[in-house]
């Protein structure tokens, strides 16, 4: 297949690109390399073509016309909940108007399908767990609102233009290439602190939980979505609740360093628990998470150690 991956130089997108290339697909990456985003030139695989462009740009039409993709994997986004709250207009420009530009170019170029990166954030704080596809969506941030709006546009473009889609609502994704210095998940932030022999902050009592899914497993879901799950919206997680305290203990085991802990009060808006039931993705996509939390954390720690070693060597 010929595939465009928007946001393909980012944390999640670059792993998806690698998965597509490994299966023999031809890939073009479109990424703005936005300073506040996750796109990095170092993340771009050599066998992928790269176009430095914003998804809102008119230049997308030429890229779509010349490459003539079969599928678009849309992972370019303004992904920060905090940034979206500070600047909801910019968030909507990228996540709504940018998506519409991509969708319009899909129609013009005769693209068969779009795979869309949605988010478990669209559910807000659910009344009961685990989260499934049937859980009511009550987004609580501009970012989550725009992701939910994106899903509605997918339905419209399928009904109006016959553009097929699959949407994947991710849990808390972690793994190599996640930026520990930005707004990232607690795992990457903690790893950065552990490897620098620094202390960590744990808010509340540390027993609040999330469903952490390894980025390699997310890439697998995107591979399966190329041919499966047409018209579907799937939650993607492990089905396991993991506390902040458990992450801390696992990193002590993996790194051999017992980082000092600063205990702080609960932050406003902190959700107590999250858990995702991905059984529908299992039945209809054939997807199940393969990577245990400890294995995923070992892989992630190893990656960040290599990066630190390369920086120390001046590479």
Image: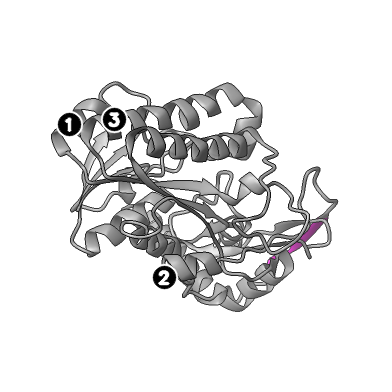
25, above or below 207, in the image: above
Answer whether residue 70 is visible to the viewer in this image.
yes
Q: Position of residue 119 (x, y in %)?
A: 55, 48
Q: Position of residue 305 (x, y in %)?
A: 45, 65
- Disc 2 element: loop
Instruction: Give the residue at the far front of this rendering.
Output: 159
Q: Earlier in the sequence, mark 3 or mark 2?
A: 3
288 vs 242, left or right, is left
130, above or below 51, in the image: below
User: Which residue in the structure is indicated by mark 3?
Assistant: 105
The main secondary structure of the magenta stretch is strand
Frontmost residue, 198 versus 189 = 189
- Extent of the magenta region: 259-263
Q: Earlier in the sequence, mark 2 or mark 1?
A: 1
Which residue occupies 34% across, 61% down? 223
User: Which residue in the structure is indicated by mark 2?
Assistant: 286
Frontmost residue, 301 versus 174 = 174
Neighbor class of circle 3 (other Cα within 10 Å; few <14, some 14-19, many 20+) is: some
Frontmost residue, 228 versus 21 = 228
Q: Position of residue 95 (x, y in %)?
A: 49, 32
Q: CA distance from mark 3 to mark 2?
A: 30 Å
Which residue occupies 49% across, 65% down? 281
68 vs 297, left or right, is left
- Disc 1 element: helix
Residue mark closest to the camera, 2 vs 1: 2
Label at residue 65: 1
5, above or below 186, in the image: above
């Amino acid at each position: 297949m010929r595939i465009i991956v928007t946001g393909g130089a980012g944390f999640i997108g670059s792993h998806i690109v690698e998965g597509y290339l490994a299966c023999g697909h031809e890939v073009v990456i479109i990424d703005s390399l936005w300073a506040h985003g996750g796109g990095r030139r170092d993340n771009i695989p050599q066998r992928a073509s790269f176009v430095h462009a914003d998804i809102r740009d008119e230049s997308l039409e030429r890229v779509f016309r010349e490459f003539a993709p079969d599928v678009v994997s849309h992972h370019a986004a303004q992904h920060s909940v905090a940034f979206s709250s500070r600047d909801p207009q910019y968030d909507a420009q990228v996540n709504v108007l940018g998506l519409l530009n991509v969708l319009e170019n899909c129609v013009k170029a005769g693209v068969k399908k779009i795979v869309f990166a949605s988010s478990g954030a669209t559910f807000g704080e659910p009344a009961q767990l685990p989260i499934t596809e049937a859980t009511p969506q009550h987004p609580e941030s501009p970012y989550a609102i725009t992701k939910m709006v994106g899903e509605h546009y997918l339905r419209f473009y399928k009904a109006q233009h016959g553009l097929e889609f699959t949407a994947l609502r991710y849990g808390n994704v972690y793994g190599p290439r996640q930026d520990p210095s930005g707004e990232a998940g607690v795992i990457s932030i903690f790893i950065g602190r552990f490897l620098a022999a620094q202390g960590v902050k744990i808010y509340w009592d540390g027993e609040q939980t999330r469903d952490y899914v390894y980025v390699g497993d997310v890439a697998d879901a995107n591979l399966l979505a190329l041919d499966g799950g047409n018209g579907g919206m799937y939650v993607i997680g492990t089905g396991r609740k993991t506390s902040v305290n458990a992450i801390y203990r696992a990193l002590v085991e993996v790194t051999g360093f017992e980082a000092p802990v600063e205990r702080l009060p609960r932050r406003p808006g902190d959700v107590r628990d999250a858990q995702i039931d991905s059984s529908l993705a299992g039945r209809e996509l054939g997807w199940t998470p393969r990577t245990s939390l400890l294995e995923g954390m070992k892989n992630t720690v190893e990656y960040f150690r290599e990066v630190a070693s390369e920086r120390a060597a001046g590479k």
